[in-house]
Image: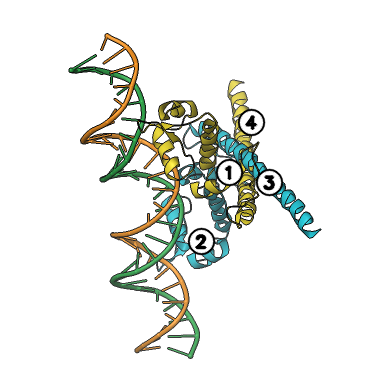
Chain colours: A cyan, B yellow, C green, D orange
Amino acid sequence: MRIGELSKRSGVPARMLRYYEEQGLVTPRRLDNGYRSYDEHLVDRVGKIRGLIDAGIPTRIIGDILPCLDRRQTIVVTDPHPELRGILLQERDRMTQKIDILVHNRDSITRYIKATDSALGVVAEKTAS
Amino acid sequence: MRIGELSKRSGVPARMLRYYEEQGLVTPRRLDNGYRSYDEHLVDRVGKIRGLIDAGIPTRIIGDILPCLDRRQTIVVTDPHPELRGILLQERDRMTQKIDILVHNRDSITRYIKATDSALGVVAEKTAS
DNA sequence: ATTGACCTTCACACTAATGGAAGGGTTCAG
DNA sequence: CTGAACCCTTCCATTAGTGTGAAGGTCAAT
């Protein structure tokens, strides 16, 4: 498919799809006329990319970990660069840390909402009575 | 305490502490000589701020939710602006979404590491034999 | 009184992610 | 053939988060 369709289907602006290509995250083929041609499995890939970017992972790192994220992957035993394992471990820990922070703060927000709700509920009851 | 000490204790560069102030996230008192004076509880606060920024939450939003994050808070029934509840709900959902994505990808990475490890383990065994 | 370690503001600059416009091809439908 | 709707590249702009440096004030210790 061409960039417009991928953009529609993935919800990612075409501008960003070109940017991801520039960053080496997706490498569409080219048609004879120079148009980008994305094949099906890239829909999923850009979905992952968006998710990770939204979650605060920079593209530089996404590029490192993306190849390891595909289910049904052929494990790359011929490791392109040997520091990969270290990078992955480190990045996994970073993600765990982010998760913990997000969970904690989300729960705080939830508690806050509940508290205000019940407080207002009481007010509503009182004013209603 | 002054900015240098807070910086050391929180691990956040003084430059950033001034930036957070500019963004309205912390409002230190001022000494007679113009120096910023932070009191104890702000150590915690900047910790939260850093965590949230690292997790990909923009300061603008942190400013909204920060007041709701303090344990031992006085619930602000006199709601400064009435859209707050909506903002909080929306932001909480965003955070949940981020969490899900992070968890999913972190687990993928973990699986990948395990897979390569055991693959290399086999190789090591074979070469060792 | 000078030195050194703080602090102040202001300003310039960089990166990452994104938006957008300019100028120019391609394709297709009418 | 012409217009609409795509696509291309290149360049410029903006925002958030940072780093860094200049020019200067404060203060404690020598």
Disc 1 with disc 4 on a shared chain: yes
Name which quarter of the figure residue B41 lies in.
top right
Residue that mark 4 sits on: B118
Which circle, 1 or 2, is nearer the viewer? Answer: 1
Residue contact between numbered discs 1 and 2, judged by CB atoms under 8 Å: no
B65 to the left or right of D5: right
Residue at image x 53%, y 67%? A5
Residue that mark 2 sits on: A38
The kind of residue tagged 4 is Ser
Which circle, 3 or 1, is nearer the viewer? Answer: 1
Camera sees residue B108: no
Residue contact between numbered discs 1 and 4, judged by CB atoms under 8 Å: no
Camera-nearest residue between B56 and B36: B36
Camera-nearest residue between A74 and D24: D24
First in residue order: circle 3 vs circle 2: 2
Q: Is residue D28 above or below residue A49?
A: above
The kind of residue tagged 1 is Pro
Q: How much space separates mark 1 and mark 2, taking CA atoms?
A: 45 Å
Q: How much space separates mark 3 and mark 2, taking CA atoms?
A: 41 Å
